[in-house]
Image (tube, helix red, strand yellow):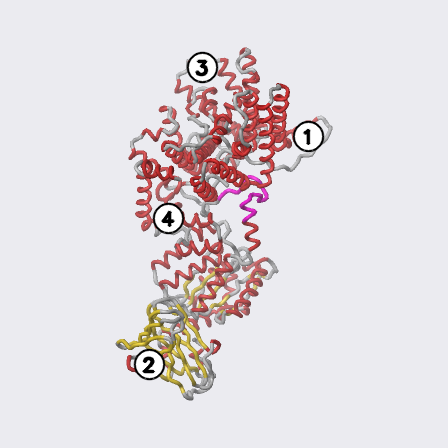
Amino acid sequence: MALYLKQFSRHFVTTAAAVAVIAVVAIELLAGPWVKSFESHEVDATLHVLEKKELNKDVVVLGDSVGRGIFSGWRSGKGTVAMLACNQATETTGQYFFLKRYLEHNGMPGAVIICDRTPGKGDLNQALTENYVQRCFTRWREILGLFRVKLDPVFTAKMVAYKLLATFKNRLHLQRTLVGFTNSDIYSGVVPASGTTPGGYGIFDVIEDEMRAARTESVSWRYLRQMLEELDGLNIPVYYLPPVTTQKIDDSHQLVQHSLAMFRDFERQFGGLHVLTDAYVRLPKSHFSDEVHLNELGLAAYRPLVQSRLDEIVQEAVDRRELNRDTAFARGTPLFSYADGKTLRMLRPVGTAAAVQGEALQLSAATKDPALLLPGLAGVEKPGQARVVVRVRMEGDSSTVARLYYAAGDEDFAQQRSLRAKVGPGLNQVSFLLPADFQGGKLRFDPGEAEGRYVLHAVEGRIIAADDAVYF
Amino acid sequence: MQFNSFTFLAFFAATFALYCCCSHRWQNRLLLAASYLFYAAWDYRFLALLLTYTVVNYLAGAKIGGSPSQRVRKSWLLVSISSSLGILGFFKYFNFFVENLNALCIAIGLGECAGVLHVVLPVGISFYTFQTLSYTIDVYRQKNEPAPSFFDFALYVAFFPTILAGPIERAGNLLVQIGAERKITPELFHASAFLILFGLFEKVVVADNLAALVNSIYGSDSGDGLNVLIATYAYTFQIFADFDGYSNVAKGIAGLMGFRLVTNFNAPYFSDSPSEFWRRWHISLSSWLRDYLYIPLGGNRAGTAMTVRNLIVTMLLGGLWHGAGWMFICWGAFHGLLLAVWLVFREAISRVPPLVRRLLFFHLICFSWMIFRAESMAQLQAQLQALLFDFDPVPDAGQLLLIRKLLFYSAIVVVYQYLQYRTARLIPVFDWPPAVRAASYVMLFYMIVIFGFNSAQSFIYFQF
């Protein structure tokens, strides 16, 4: 070891090799911004759009090329839908990364629709995975996340290579740009050749097969679950739209049946997930351009069958976002409002120190369970199915979950009688829709589940009509 | 696990990191374990075969070296040769001989005499067979001492940089280095790093891209003479870049760990005679054939006729070593014939100007690669017909692109070989000023990064 280190210090660093290494680093740093604008396929293009533009749509569509085909010509979806559905080789893992990037620069969508033939299936071992996932999703968080889930150092090494070398990442464009060579084949990444012996008797193949067999959950399944969990935490409804299949009982049909069963399981865990079983449509083979993609005739036949359901979902999503933009909330009848220093002072802190600063109430939580007791609400009078909505505008230091507890006069606060909302660092506005049978009683607001600083700007309650309540 | 794969990168990074932290004794143990893992990555079932070779030849070497009786020594040598060649013959040639025997039997009306076996050819078997044979023969000839340690001998047989496609190392070189404490000098370190870079360039930029070009022409039935000519030139550079690339990476990897492997190629396409070509092409095989086949057959000691016979027999077997197929035998025969013609008409040929001689001989080599690459005599015949009778020297747009690619991918290799030839230095880059050297490293790196073929292709010589 010492010998090698000595060589690096005494001989290696001063030679042409060191100059070459420095030159490569400099070229990569300079080339990075230049080649960033290159796009070779829909994943590149979508990522480019997500980085450069604010989409801020009401609905996000995730899925594969089948989903993309269904939604791309959808008239009423125009202007309201962010199309992130892409090639099937991205698998749910790639779709999860898309969604994460979308949420970075855009407002919360009112709904997420998943239309995918193989949701939650696959371990990113497909021929085009390298091109669509490893080459494109190269943030350290994504690389490390995949390493943790996949446990494949070679897979990770490739992602790191694509991350560090902008020229490697965009090599096809550079081949075209520098010498005018074109490659008509779709770039599948640097695919290792298999061994010369047939049957997969290589020791690494065997180990990989064993690991795959031992793993009960696929990589994509784990990312699907994570995505549903996070969307649930953000109170964003998710719809699974089963892709259209042929009338034949074939692989596509089996896949959809499997996906429906899986999503129904998830539906029991995540209240915001809706499986659109009734929107599963099967059409004659003549309506397909291949085994899975609809042709013009197929699209013309399919759209009317699901149009009204999809329109409903979009309308709900639009309304939900509208509500968050205050309009629907403003329609309601005021119940209480603590929106300035004078009124916020009336909230009683529990497990935290509170002080009014200007027009806001600042909490310094020393425990993981800071809370504020709101003045009691005796006998709320509301017509029929009208609902109470509590809206909070607050700032926090970290990502956490805020919770509103409600209880009748003689009840204690309990987890099952609480509503939760994900909050992030910075300014947040969250709304809690209390159950229709809530007729008044006690309210407690927990701004987060972490120690630290919270600043409350407003806590307001309104009674809203049943129609409006649907959108919460 | 190809040298040009990320899997190998991860494997070597881990091995090398551990290697740097070990003492000499543990370095050898580590390399042995890594070599078995490397071989098992291809097909773990053949580890038993590798161990059989190791045990039999180690035992034979020990018995030969330890016995004063010539009869005992000869018996153990026979055990070593017959077992090694027997295994090689079974895996590599059994089906070939059965198929030809059946063809003969059918031709004379006897019907099929024997059934073929569905055996898989263990990767690298031809290389480690020759390597172990050279060991026992050298011990028998008392050129070498028997290996002092079984583990050292096992590493000599299975050493991962060389096991798949050579260079075919002699015990006098590799085994001695395994036994001794290895010294890594800055020069060796630099040379090794450069060889890896250049070898990868040759493989993934030159050989793999030219392979795509060659396969596209060979795969089509266009029968255009110019296409065949382009493919022939392309294959000539492809096979060189492929095998020289492999050899350079192997030498570089071994060099980083302090080993000095033999040189396998030395600007062979600048040779002006067949004998010079075989001193520059696949040197470890040609010298093996010379030392263990040609010279024992009598070499050039018994007159011109016997020398010609020895040359042709040696080259026929050399062709057969490459694979069980008639085209390989024809390729060997052609080279044997070239050597014989050179031997007989040497003086007359030497009067031809060197440049003309070199060009002429280069094209004879190109022709030999046509034989080597052809899958059958009929395909070779069709290509020759296209070359001779369907040759339009004016290229169309598609052919112009092929020519551009051929020139782009092979130019650096040709220039580099020329420099090797002119300077008689294997790494002429090291004579250049530091700035030019640095620029050439950067260029090679970016050629690999940008123009490296999309899919890591298997090395041609792995199939032999």
A224, B372: nearer the viewer = A224
* Callout 4 secondary element: helix
Residue B275: in sight, yes or no?
yes
Residue under circle 3? B349
Q: Nearer the viewer, mark 1 or mark 2?
A: 2
The span from disc 1 to disc 2 (Cα, nearest Å) is: 98 Å
The span from disc 1 to disc 3 (Cα, nearest Å) is: 44 Å
* Callout 3 secondary element: helix
Of helix, strand and loop, which mostly describes the magenta segment? Answer: loop
**Which chain is disc 3 placed on?**
B
Residue type at mark 2: give it: Tyr
**Which chain is disc 1 placed on?**
B
* Callout 1 secondary element: helix
Residue drawn at x 36%, y 46% is: A167
Residue drawn at x 43%, y 26% is: B266
At which x and y percent is residue B255?
Answer: 42, 33
**Mark number, residue A338:** 2
**Mark number, residue B102:** 1
The span from disc 3 to disc 4 (Cα, nearest Å) is: 56 Å
At which x and y percent is residue A168?
Answer: 39, 46
Q: Earlier in the sequence, mark 1 or mark 3?
A: 1
Contact? badges 1 and 3 (CB < 8 Å):
no
Do badges 1 and 3 share one subunit? Answer: yes
Do badges 4 and 2 share one subunit? Answer: yes
B420, B377: nearer the viewer = B420
The span from disc 2 to disc 3 (Cα, nearest Å) is: 106 Å
The span from disc 1 to disc 4 (Cα, nearest Å) is: 58 Å
The residue stretch that appears in magenta = A192-207
B64, B120: nearer the viewer = B64
Residue under circle 4? A164
